[in-house]
Amino acid sequence: MSDDELIDRIKSGDEAAAEELIDRYYAAILRYCGWHCPDPERAEDLTQETFLKLFRSLPAYRGRNKFKAYLYTIANRLCIDESRKMPFYSLKDAEELASGKNEITQAEDREEIGRLLGVLSEVQREAVLLRFGQELGFAEIAKVMGCSRRTAQSRVRNGLRLMRREFGDER
């Protein structure tokens, strides 16, 4: 069932459709919020707030934009508000880190990723995280970040170029 069909069912009062939508996106939104918040409990709270705001705003949602971009826009705004309260980002990707590496290797990986992303501006970092961490398309990134598609592409391309330079790959 498509996201739009689930939304229509949710608007009609179908609680099972709401649960299915949450199941479909909860882990990805939690991971996204975890990148922006060092405290796992706060990332969980931000994820729940994202879905709460989503369900409150659904009566006004007209489906003009892709749903995934709409959902990530809500999460993005909550994370931006949270990041204003905190001076740094955390990069905890539970799926990758649970791949059997020991804690020292995990910490080194997080530190290296943080160092690479640290060379980027805030908008470049956000665009790179949305593109590769959440696998959004450039049109969806543009909607989430409130910019044009070409600007989203440019932010990702320039961010990758800076990261390659920092890593020593001068392609």
Image (cartoon, rainbow, N blue to C red):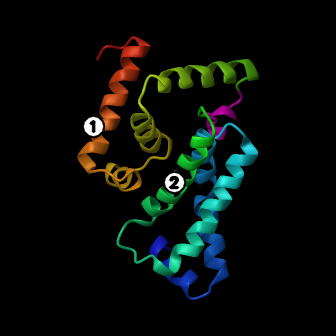
* Magenta residue check for 99: yes
Marking on residue 1? none
Residue 147, image x and y in percent?
A: 31, 50
The residue that label 1 is drawn on is 154
Question: Can you say whether 160 is above or below 58 in the image?
Answer: above
Q: Residues within 10 Å of mark 1 (few under 14, many from 20)?
A: some
**Residue type marked 2:** Arg
Q: Residues within 10 Å of mark 2 (few under 14, many from 20)?
A: some
* Whole-number angstrom distance, CA of label 2 to CA of label 1: 21 Å
User: Is the stretch drawn in magenta largely helix, strand or loop?
Assistant: loop
Q: Quadrant of the C terminus?
A: top left
Task: Specify the quadrant of the image occupied by residue 102.
Answer: top right
* Magenta residue check for 163: no
Of residue 135 and residue 150, the one placed in the foreground of this image is 150
Tag 1 or tag 2, which sits nearer the N-term?
2
Q: State the residue lying farthest toward the top.
A: 168
Of residue 61 and residue 109, the one placed in the foreground of this image is 61
The residue that label 2 is drawn on is 77
Residue 2 in sight here: no
The residue segment tinted magenta is: 90-100
Residue in view at x 50 percent, y 41 percent:
133
| Mark 2 vs mark 1: in front | 2
**Residue type marked 1:** Ser
Task: Specify the quadrant of the image occupied by residue 103.
Answer: top right
Q: Is residue 140 left or right of residue 20?
A: left
Q: State the residue lying farthest toward the front.
A: 85
Residue in view at x 49 percent, y 46 percent:
134
